[in-house]
Amino acid sequence: MSQPKLSIPEMHAYMAEVFPELGPRLEVLEIAPYRLLARMATIPADLRPGGTVSGPTLFALADCAYYMATLAMIGREALTVTTGAAIDFMRKPAPGWLRAEARVLKLGRALSVGDVLVFSEGVEGPVARASLTYSIPPAPSSRSSSASQNSARS
Amino acid sequence: MSQPKLSIPEMHAYMAEVFPELGPRLEVLEIAPYRLLARMATIPADLRPGGTVSGPTLFALADCAYYMATLAMIGREALTVTTGAAIDFMRKPAPGWLRAEARVLKLGRALSVGDVLVFSEGVEGPVARASLTYSIPPAPSSRSSSASQNSARS
Amino acid sequence: MSQPKLSIPEMHAYMAEVFPELGPRLEVLEIAPYRLLARMATIPADLRPGGTVSGPTLFALADCAYYMATLAMIGREALTVTTGAAIDFMRKPAPGWLRAEARVLKLGRALSVGDVLVFSEGVEGPVARASLTYSIPPAPSSRSSSASQNSARS
Amino acid sequence: MSQPKLSIPEMHAYMAEVFPELGPRLEVLEIAPYRLLARMATIPADLRPGGTVSGPTLFALADCAYYMATLAMIGREALTVTTGAAIDFMRKPAPGWLRAEARVLKLGRALSVGDVLVFSEGVEGPVARASLTYSIPPAPSSRSSSASQNSARS
């Protein structure tokens, strides 16, 4: 089993650089092989009528957590992009801390496929479940070392 | 076939009230039975590394467009919430205008199910396709007239 | 936490009755609260060109495993139906035994939401991942104790 | 806009060869650029308790219709495989004829992404809606003209 290539501080620094909007809101709590745990505090703009957290906010959290879980394994690849996602909203989240548990189920040369459970502080059971597919760009010529990485992943 | 219950100006006024963050960014272009067309201009916070529009931005647009397409048919129901969504990101959108075409495929008493195509100005073919399911809350006692509406919809 | 209402032999007997086609092909290995493990051997009709297992076969296995995981918790409810599903096919399964691990993430009065991982004997990592939503029908008159719960839903 | 590469009789012959189980059950009614219309009659094995058509049957129909819509545009490529799908079951189909309308929204070198609406004879409105992603295999050596295209992908 491969080991993560980024530490928590390295991930925080990278996200602040490439995602200046959402990145700094997410605090990575744990990075393990093919798993990542993060949390985020809601802000007023995240809320919907009735005081619940909006669907796009939960989607953005799941998407970002899965992006980080993939980056943790492959290294900095800012151009990695979501190609597809399915999300179920199961319980009403409360304003406050949201926790995302991401797991990578398949990491190929071109695709990363996995899922994320989102929990809300004080709510029993997950509030959302997302499955995500990310496309990993072909290595540009400047990443000469990537051939060996890719053969190890295949 | 039922007729829409909200006009474009009524929809704009309602969205500004219930979605002060995203609502005012969406301009409704057309409301027809079970169909709604809207557009939104991207802002810097919507962009990702490489200059493309982020997945959560496209998701938020699709989600909001479908919400409005449902509301147009059932009337103001702010508590209507997304229960599930699946989205495919197919082409790289460009900063600028995004257009969303929402169609309601099933409108039952408890659920609204349909899909949205998202287009980006200057890009041929849709940049994203989303299917969405919204849960429509049971009528509270204060909406005494809703019983007949519901029987008509079933 | 609730306990399962059906044992493995009860589940086998029930599936043979309500799903005479697929039911007898699935062998339930374990029933636990909100979890069910089952396996199925592929037959020639399940295979696609190239010798792999067809997508619809994997979908049918995931769907049936999740149906049983829900029934195990709520009891015999043959009319429970799938309302939505999303599935990712991640690795090429081999002919032979397929194993499905179903978990129920939310069991409400009207909906059961969860996911299933499918494994293929001799393949490392899951070959497919499905998320499923099942609609649970309102109780018929014979379940008099739940009538009041259900009237709130209508 | 590209033209289809397969006629209806060619499609029927090819499906009978590569999908001996499901292929002969589907009758292609129309092939147009990026669109295909097909129908299938249900058989007893497709039905569920209560007389409705099973989810896996609807999934298999949607999957097969989309496969044919893709093949119609790219030519015979039996190894083209589904990588992901999301399906919503919206209305109760009746035993009898099911009709599938497939449209290809994006046809790239490596992926085909689109959706399918399924209708049931005598039921107003679609009974199911599916979005599908198919992976198109790299060209074998016999397709020498596309080798250079594909080397860019590896």
Image (tube, coloured by chain):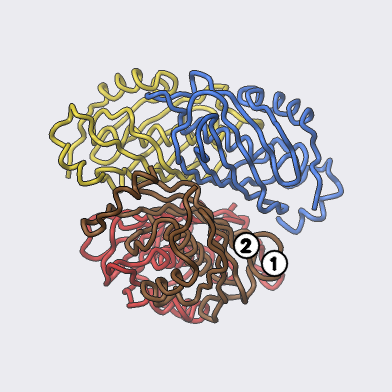
Chain colours: A brown, B red, C blue, D yellow
SS assignment at label 2:
loop
Q: Residues within 10 Å of mark 2 (few under 14, many from 20)?
A: many
- Which chain is indicated by disc 2? A
Give the percent coordinates (x, y) of residue A61.
50, 67
Q: Amino acid at mark 2?
A: Val
The lab-note entry on whether marks 2 and 1 share a chain reads yes
Asked where in the image residue C73 lies, by quadrant, the reply is top right
Count of numbered circles on the image: 2
Q: Residues within 10 Å of mark 1 (few under 14, many from 20)?
A: few
Residue D34 tag number: none
Q: Amino acid at mark 1?
A: Val
| Quarter of the picture holding the C terminus of chain A | top left
The answer to whether residue D45 is above or below residue A9 is above
- Which chain is indicated by disc 1? A
Q: Which residue is mark 1?
A: A123
The Cα atoms of the two marked residues, 2 and 1, are separated by: 8 Å
Give the percent coordinates (x, y) of residue C50.
37, 24
The answer to whether residue A134 is above or below residue C27 is below
Residue B114 shows in the view: no
Q: Which residue shows up at 53% across the image and 19% down it?
A: C43
